Image: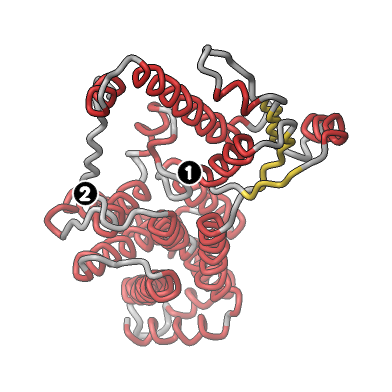
Amino acid sequence: MWNIARKEWKLLLKEKGAFFWLLALPIAFIVLFGTIFDSAGGSSLKLSYIDLDRTDASRAFIQAVADAGGYKMVEADEAALEDKIQRIRDGKETALLVIPKAFGQEIASAEGGQTAVTVYRDAADAAAVGPLLAILDNLANGYRDSRVKSALQATGLSGPQQEQVLAAPFRIDDRPENALHNNGITQYVPGYTVMFVFFVIISMIRRFIGDKESGMIARMRSTTIKPISYLAGIWLAYLAVALVQCAVLLSFGHWAYGMQLGDVAAVALLVFALALCGTGIGLALSMLVRSENQGVAFTQLITMGGAVLGGLWFPIDLMPSTMQTIGHFTPQFWAQKAFQDILVRGMHTGDILASLLVLAAVALAGLALALFRFKAFMRTATG
């Protein structure tokens, strides 16, 4: 068994494609999304505006918008209004803010006058413009409160009395629970680690099919190697590969992006259960499929389908309830849930027992199916 495992490791070291699928590609995905999140956190969105008032009040308003939303304000001339609107219609720009004439005069008026700040926006990109509209609404409420405060002051109310009148009837007491290090990295690093563990199935199928077609398994019958030792040796080899793969990817997330690993012992136990699960499914598929192409097709279905339904690419809470229910039947969901419990919520081994049991059950089911089908596989290999 150990000799077969060592032989398999030597062959894998010679296969550049295996390194690409198991290490280079997942690291590339992690770098891509890590760069996106780093850039999103440190860059400013551009917002074009036209100031028709050009007073201290309008300039203060523009600065307030920039400060509240982190926007980089880009001024445009009044003559460019139609061109800007057309660019929005063509999808080349997202929004344009227009401050009207007499803006400062109207907001300073004690007679309750009202002006209109116009937002031209791309209706197809509501997600990008939504925060801007919320900021403008908050600023409008702030200006309204200032006007009300001036009116109350004119009635002779003291400062504390004015504050009491203007106070909201309730306040928001925000108390986040069980979230120690929640960000995009804690979603994508474990997500792609889980996803690419299942790509080891392709390498396993190729090895079994290749050994069968080359006649190696048939020749093995004339040696002292027991068939079950061959099966166990291949499984052991790829179990070690999956363990190394997880260790490399999680370590990369830790050192490159500062991802906190939490309880390392719990992570190690989870990685072992995940590797057992992936290789267990790999053994079962290797005994069932009749060709490499068929095996690759099934692997893609399991890997990609499980990635979507299991919440590896984005939080599963964003999916419809029916899809969330289906996702609970995938091992990827339980692996990702356990990683999130450890990395984000600071949980330990005792808190992820359900996930560990599910992964172990899937692994045992795969091993049992592989053993059940092994004799039939050997018969087809020996003709």
Q: Between label 1 and label 2, give the one nearer the viewer.
A: 2
- Which residue corresponds to mark 2? 178
Q: Which residue is drawn at 59% across and 47% down?
A: 71
Q: Can residue 230 be seen in this view?
A: no
Q: Is residue 305 above or below residue 78?
A: below
Q: Is residue 258 left or right of residue 175?
A: right
Q: Is residue 65 left or right of residue 82?
A: left
Determine which quarter of the picture holds residue 83.
Answer: top right
Question: What type is the residue that disc 2 sits on?
Answer: Asn
Q: Distance between the residues labelled 1 and 2?
A: 25 Å
Q: In this view, does 73 lie above or below 87?
A: below
Total numbered circles = 2
- Which residue corresponds to mark 1? 308
Determine which quarter of the picture holds residue 191.
Answer: bottom left
Q: Which residue is drawn at 25% across and 69% down?
A: 268
Bin the neighbour count of mark 2 within 10 Å (Cα to Cα): few under 14, some 14-19, many 20 and up. few
- The secondary element bearing badge 2 is classed as loop
Q: Which of marks 1 and 2 is nearer the N terminus?
A: 2
